[in-house]
Image (cartoon, rainbow, N blue to C red):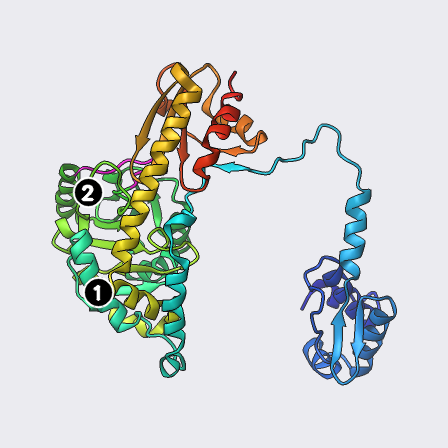
C-alpha cells in the first residue's frame, strides 16, 4: 500500500483522493486511463464503498476524472494543461544552456535504413502470423525447434560453430540469456570482463553474487567474458593466433570462456575470423550471438550455445524458464534464413556500410586536410580521426555535442602524442550530410 494511503492523520477518503490526484498530476496515470470501479477499489484499498465513492466524487468535482454512465471513471487531461502552463511560465535558469538536439549522430550503432528491406520482412511476419494453431500456444522454453535446427546450420557455415540444436537456447537479448547461464556456473569463482564497458553484462553477474576480477589471470578456474570480434567499443578484432592461445590457456586453467560474438559479420578488410567456440571444438566456450545487428535492433532475438559440460545442469532447469523471445518472430526468422535472405541481408549491409565509410573518409579528408590522420577501422565500418590539437578528446566531444554532433571520444592514452582521437560511425547519418557535419565538427578545435 502506498504511503499516502497509510497517513492516519487525514480522513480515509482524502487519502484516496490525494493518492489518485498525485498520480494524475505526475502523469503516471495517462489521459483516458480507467480507474478501478468503486467496488474493486474498495476491495483493493480495504476501505468501504462509501469512502471510495466520496473520493471519486471529489476528484470528479475538481476535474481530475470524469464519470461516464455505465462505463466508469476516466482520467481527464487536466495534468497536461497544468504542466504545460507551468513549463511556459518557468523562467530560465541563469547560466544554464538548453541542450541542442543532435543532428548528426556519429556515435550511434543503429542499423542503416537503406540496408534493411522492410517490405520483405513484413511479408515473413505476416506469413508467421497466419499460423494460427502455432500461435495459440506458448513458445518452447529453449526456443522453437525448427529455428534452432536452422541456426545450427547457419552457425556452422558462417562462424564454424560446433553444436547441435539441443545446445542452443533462444532469448530476447543477451541479458535474458545471461539470466539462464549464471545459475549454471559456480558463483564462488571470479569472472573477468575483457571489455569493462559492457555494463549490461557485468550487472547480471553482480546480481547473482559473482566476484569480479580485473585481469584474466585472476579468473583462475572462473569465467572469462570476451567479445573477440569487437574487443572494445572502439573496435579491435582478436587474431586467430591469439584466439588459439586463449583457448589453450583457458583449458589449462579450467577457465570457462564466454564468447560474445556480436558484430562479427561486419568486418571491413577481411572475412570474419573463426569463432573461439569453433576453434575449441565446442568445448569450454559458451557462444553468444544476436540478430540485432544483422536485422534490426528492435528484433530482440539472441541465442546461446552451451558447451556439453553445462547441458546436464541446463536440462534440469530449462522448464523453469519462460521463453522471452517472440514466437512469431522466431517463425519468421526461420524461413527468412531458409530462403537465403539473411545471408543476402548481411552482404547488402556490408556493401552499403563500406560505401558510406569511404564517403565519410573522403568528406573528412576534404575538410580536415592535414589537420587529422584518418583511418577506417573494423568491425562496424567506423572512422578513426586523430586530430593535431592540444584540446582533449573529451573536450572536443563535448563541444561537438553543443553543436549538435555526437561522436565517441577515445581515451587520451589511446590517442597519438599531441593529438585528440575520435571515432565516428557511418550508419546513422546520411552520406549527403557528411560534408556539412565535418565542417561543423572542425569548428570544435579551431
On the image, which quarter does residue 42 sit in? bottom right
Residue at 79% in and 56% down: 81
Badge 1: how crowded within 10 Å, few (<14), some, or many (20+)? many
Q: Check if residue 185 falls in the magenta segment.
A: no
Query: Which of the 4 image quadrants contains residue 422?
Result: top left
Q: Is residue 358 left or right of residue 105?
A: left
Identify whether 438 is placed above or below 225: above
Q: In this view, does 399 lie to the left or right of 118?
A: right
> Please, what secondary structure does the residue beneath circle 2 have?
loop
Quick one: SS at disc 1? helix
Type of secondary structure dominating the magenta stretch: loop
Q: What residue span does the magenta drawing correspond to?
A: 230-239
Q: Where is residue 369 in the image (x, y as percent from the top left)?
A: 40, 17
Residue 116, percent from left and from top = 38, 53
The residue at which mark 2 appears reads as: 271
| Place of residue 129 in the rendered image (x, y in percent of width and height, measured from the top left) | 40, 75
Is 302 in front, or is 369?
Answer: 369
| Quadrant in which residue 295 is drawn | bottom left
Question: What label does residue 167 carry, if any?
Answer: 1
For residue 247, say whether it is visible: yes
User: Which residue is depicted at the point 51% across and 36% down?
Assistant: 104
How far separated are the C-alphas under marks 2 and 1? 26 Å
Q: In which quarter of the image is the N terminus?
A: bottom right
Tag nearer the camera, 2 or 1: 2
User: What residue appears at the point 32 percent right and 36 percent down from the top-left corner?
Assistant: 235
As drawn, the residue found furthest toward the right would be 61
Amino acid at each position: 500500500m502506498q504511503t499516502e494511503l497509510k497517513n492516519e492523520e487525514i480522513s480515509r477518503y482524502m487519502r484516496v483522493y490525494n493518492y489518485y490526484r498525485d498520480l494524475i498530476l505526475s502523469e503516471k496515470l495517462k489521459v483516458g486511463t480507467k480507474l478501478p470501479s468503486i467496488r474493486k477499489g474498495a476491495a483493493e484499498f480495504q476501505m468501504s464503498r462509501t469512502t471510495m465513492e466520496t473520493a471519486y466524487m471529489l476528484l470528479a468535482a475538481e476535474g481530475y476524472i470524469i464519470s461516464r454512465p455505465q462505463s466508469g471513471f476516466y482520467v481527464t487531461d487536466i495534468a497536461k494543461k497544468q504542466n504545460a502552463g507551468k513549463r511556459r511560465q518557468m523562467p530560465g535558469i541563469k547560466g544554464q544552456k538548453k541542450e541542442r538536439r543532435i543532428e548528426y549522430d556519429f556515435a550511434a550503432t543503429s542499423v542503416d535504413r537503406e540496408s534493411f528491406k522492410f517490405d520483405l520482412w513484413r511479408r515473413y511476419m505476416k506469413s508467421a502470423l497466419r499460423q494460427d494453431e502455432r500461435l495459440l500456444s506458448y513458445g518452447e522454453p529453449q526456443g522453437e525447434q525448427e529455428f534452432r535446427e536452422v541456426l545450427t546450420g547457419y552457425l556452422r557455415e558462417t562462424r564454424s560453430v560446433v553444436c547441435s540444436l539441443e545446445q542452443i537456447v533462444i532469448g530476447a537479448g543477451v541479458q535474458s540469456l545471461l539470466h539462464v547461464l549464471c545459475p549454471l556456473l559456480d558463483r564462488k569463482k571470479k569472472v573477468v570482463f575483457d571489455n569493462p564497458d559492457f555494463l549490461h553484462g557485468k550487472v547480471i553477474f553482480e546480481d547473482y553474487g559473482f566476484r569480479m576480477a580485473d585481469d584474466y589471470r585472476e579468473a583462475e578456474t572462473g569465467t572469462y567474458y570476451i567479445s573477440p570480434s569487437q574487443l572494445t567499443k572502439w573496435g579491435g578484432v582478436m587474431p586467430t593466433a591469439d584466439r588459439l592461445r586463449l583457448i589453450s590457456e583457458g583449458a589449462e586453467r579450467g577457465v570457462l570462456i564466454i564468447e560474445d560474438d556480436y558484430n562479427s559479420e561486419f568486418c571491413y578488410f577481411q572475412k570474419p575470423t573463426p569463432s573461439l567456440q569453433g576453434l575449441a571444438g565446442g568445448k569450454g566456450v559458451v557462444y553468444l550471438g544476436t540478430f540485432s545487428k544483422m536485422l534490426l535492433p528492435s528484433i530482440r532475438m539472441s541465442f546461446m550455445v552451451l558447451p556439453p559440460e553445462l547441458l546436464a545442469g541446463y536440462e534440469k532447469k530449462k522448464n523453469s524458464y519462460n521463453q522471452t523471445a517472440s514466437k512469431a518472430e522466431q517463425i519468421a526468422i526461420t524461413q527468412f534464413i531458409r530462403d537465403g535472405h539473411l545471408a543476402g541481408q548481411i552482404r547488402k549491409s556490408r556493401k552499403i556500410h563500406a560505401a558510406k565509410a569511404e564517403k565519410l573518409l573522403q568528406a573528412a579528408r576534404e575538410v580536415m586536410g592535414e589537420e587529422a590522420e584518418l583511418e577506417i577501422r573494423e568491425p562496424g565500418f567506423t572512422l578513426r580521426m586523430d586530430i593535431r590539437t592540444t584540446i582533449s578528446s573529451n573536450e572536443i566531444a563535448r563541444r561537438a555535442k553543443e553543436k549538435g554532433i555526437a561522436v565517441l571520444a577515445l581515451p587520451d592514452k589511446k590517442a597519438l602524442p599531441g593529438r585528440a582521437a575520435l571515432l565516428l560511425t557511418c550508419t546513422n547519418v546520411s552520406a549527403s550530410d557528411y560534408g556539412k557535419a565535418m565542417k561543423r565538427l572542425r569548428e570544435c578545435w579551431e
